[in-house]
């Protein structure tokens, strides 16, 4: 219990409001730190020589102003971050905290072995510094990225089976930002987002952090089962399906062409958007058709250099139907300065 005695002398208005004002002041000047427990109603009433009702009303007023939280029997506490909503959760604490023993293989994160990348980056940065007017990178750029970068993105996406003009490409800070920007662009708070029942945790975290409702779909050896998708569409009226058709993370499953066709057919029937996460598509010797090539009118396709070059580059490319490009680009703008 915090030993705190407010000084109500000289405060105007009713005593209970003066008490709430004193609490606010003590929080601001640090006398009452986050989480500290206020004196009991009875003790404070005794100390100040006022009725218990006055203290109760004062604490209620402080609670109404969002300064404290109280529960019968538990006491009254200065509000801290624990009273806020759930933060976005992506459980990678094992990856960042455990030391890797000599000779052990770290399976907690997956990205390309970083052998030649540092040397190539040094060469490229030197060339960029010599050849380019660097000053133009110091101003704000267009929301979807500089045209030359979108041209490079379109060329990269063409190799992965997505033929789009540069105007349909949006640069993102990795795949994670693409997911959030896409969900921001097409969903409203509370909408249902379908995804594989076992999936990349970033997809679920993206949906949850936007106040959306992630819902997992049953899978078989080829990924999402079309009949289950159909059922979920009828029951949950989802806005978008987030799926990883190729080398699904974490199951490594690959949707056959027939399965892709069936998924697209259900999506069309229910007017469902598809967010195709093809971050591992480049690993295929014989690439399968992308969902974006099969249903370009409703598929937002995303990939990132994290799994093909290096995750620290934080460069991703997204291709979207024309009317969604400005919406997704606006989401990127909200999240970054790019
Ligand atoms: C399937 C999948 N999508 C997206 C990401 C995130 O991509 P980025 O690191 O570019 O944000 C990952 C990273 O592990 C992933 O496995």
Image (tube, rainbow, N blue to C red):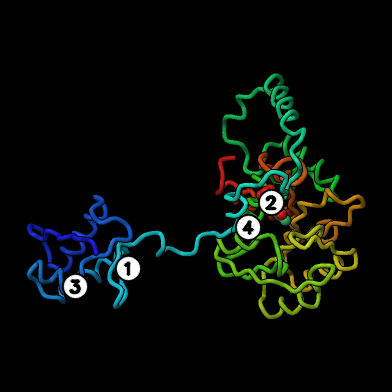
* Precedes in sequence: disc 3 or disc 4: 3
Q: Quadrant of residue 11?
A: bottom left
* Precedes in sequence: disc 2 or disc 1: 1
Residue 249 in sight: yes
Q: Residue 188's x, y, as percent? A: 58, 65
Position of 182 relative to 100 (above/below): below
Separation of residues labelled 3 and 2 (CA atoms)? 52 Å
Q: Residue 53's x, y, as percent? A: 16, 76
Q: Quadrant of residue 68?
A: bottom left
SS class, disc 2:
loop
Position of 216 relative to 322 (above/below): below
* Precedes in sequence: disc 1 or disc 3: 3
Q: Which residue is mark 3?
A: 41
* Precedes in sequence: disc 3 or disc 2: 3
* Precedes in sequence: disc 4 or disc 2: 2
Position of 254 relative to 311 (above/below): below
Residue positioned 20% across, 74% down in the render: 56
SS class, disc 1:
strand
Q: Residues within 10 Å of mark 3 (few under 14, many from 20)?
A: some
Q: Which residue is mark 1?
A: 69
Determine whether, in the image, residue 122 is placed left or right of residue 223: left
Residue 326 in sight: no
Separation of residues labelled 1 and 4 (CA atoms)? 35 Å
Q: Which residue is mark 2?
A: 109
Q: Is mark 1 within 8 Å of ligand 1?
A: no
Residue positioned 12% across, 64% down in the render: 13
Q: Which residue is mark 4?
A: 185
Between 310 and 176, the residue placed more toward the observer is 310
Between 221 and 206, the residue placed more toward the observer is 221
State which quarter of the image contains the N terminus. Answer: bottom left
């Amino acid at each position: 219990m915090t030993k705190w005695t407010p000084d109500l002398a000289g405060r105007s208005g009713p005593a209970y409001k003066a008490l709430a004002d004193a609490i606010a002041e003590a929080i601001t000047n640090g006398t009452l730190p986050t989480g500290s427990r206020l004196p009991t109603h009875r003790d404070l009433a005794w100390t100040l020589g006022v009725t218990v009702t006055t203290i109760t009303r004062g604490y209620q007023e402080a609670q109404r102003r969002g300064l404290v939280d109280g529960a019968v029997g538990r006491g009254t506490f200065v509000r801290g971050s624990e009273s806020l909503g759930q933060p976005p959760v992506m459980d990678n604490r094992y990856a960042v905290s455990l030391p890797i023993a000599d000779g052990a293989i770290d399976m907690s994160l997956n990205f390309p072995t970083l052998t030649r990348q540092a040397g190539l980056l040094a060469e490229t940065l030197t060339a960029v510094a010599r050849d380019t007017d660097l000053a133009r990178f110091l101003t704000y750029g267009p929301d979807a990225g500089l045209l030359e970068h979108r041209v490079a993105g379109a060329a990269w996406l063409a190799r992965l089976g997505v033929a789009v003009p540069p105007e349909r490409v949006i640069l993102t800070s990795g795949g994670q930002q693409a997911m959030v920007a896409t969900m921001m662009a097409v969903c409203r708070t509370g909408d249902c987002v379908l995804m594989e029942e076992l999936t990349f945790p970033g997809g679920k975290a993206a949906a949850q952090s936007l106040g959306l409702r992630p819902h997992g779909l049953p899978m078989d050896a080829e990924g999402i089962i079309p009949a289950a998708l159909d059922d979920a569409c009828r029951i949950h009226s989802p806005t978008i399906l987030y799926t990883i058709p190729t080398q699904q993370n974490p199951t490594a499953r690959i949707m056959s062409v027939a399965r892709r066709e069936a998924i697209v057919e259900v999506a069309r029937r229910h007017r469902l958007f598809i967010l195709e996460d093809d971050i591992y598509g480049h690993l295929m010797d014989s690439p399968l058709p992308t969902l974006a090539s099969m249903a370009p009118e409703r598929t937002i396709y995303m990939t990132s250099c994290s799994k093909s070059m290096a995750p620290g580059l934080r460069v991703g490319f997204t291709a979207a139907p024309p009317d969604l490009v400005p919406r997704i680009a606006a989401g990127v703008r909200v999240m970054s300065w790019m």
